[in-house]
Image (cartoon, rainbow, N blue to C red):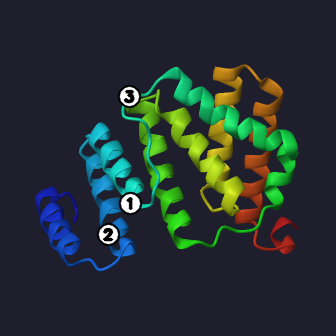
Amino acid sequence: MCGDFEQVESWAAIVLQEAKTIFDIVKVYEVKIQTDIAQNQLLKAINTGLLVLQKFGISFPEKLSELDIQLEIDAITSLFSEMPIEELSYLPQMVEQDKLEAMRILSRITTVAQIAAPNLMPLFASKQVSLSIQNGNASTSPVAYANFGLILCGLVGNIESGYEFGQLALRHSTKLFAPDDSYLC
């Protein structure tokens, strides 16, 4: 709406009132998140994202502790202890629409959290990696893998696994953006 944020809110309220499915609602909330970001209301954007994620059955603790973050990271590290990290690039494509929408919302608020609420970023990135491992890779998975690699290096001190996640992100993003081998010639 070219900066007419009041009009965006008005239209969003109408669409939300008339929406029939969660997928109708999520599109409106994505616009609201973008509007909040454009107005530099980053915490409001995160809260809007959290509200949408609850509709997909994804919630986070209201009072975040170091233990919450550690538990999420440990859950993922236990998953890749059974499977090498590089194998994650061979996961099937994520096809469930609700999971894809959740990944997109998480991707938007993870980026914002890096600036406005850095303590939430590890939780959001970990959730994206978990969704990818459980449901297949999405177009947003490479950024989640890169963010998780950053977490492993910076918070956990596991440089080797963090590097492997970075390489995984690079390989997977290359697969996404190189539609065929003729592009590489």
Asked if one can make out residue 80 in the rendered structure from this viewpoint, the answer is yes
Under circle 1, the secondary element is: helix
The amino acid type, in three-letter code, at marker 3 is Lys
The label number, if any, that marks residue 118 in the structure image? none
Which residue: 65% across, 48% down? 129
* Residue 23 locus on image (x, y percent): 39, 73
The amino acid type, in three-letter code, at marker 2 is Ile
* Residue 142 locus on image (x, y percent): 67, 51
Is 26 placed above or below 107 here? below
Residue indicated by mark 2? 25
Residue indicated by mark 3? 63
Which residue: 42% across, 54% down? 53
Q: Earlier in the sequence, mark 3 or mark 2?
A: 2
Neighbourhood count class around disc 2 (C-alpha, 10 Å): few under 14, some 14–19, many 20 upward: some
- Looking at the rendered image, the disc whose residue lies closer to the viewer, 2 or 1, is 1
Residue indicated by mark 1? 55
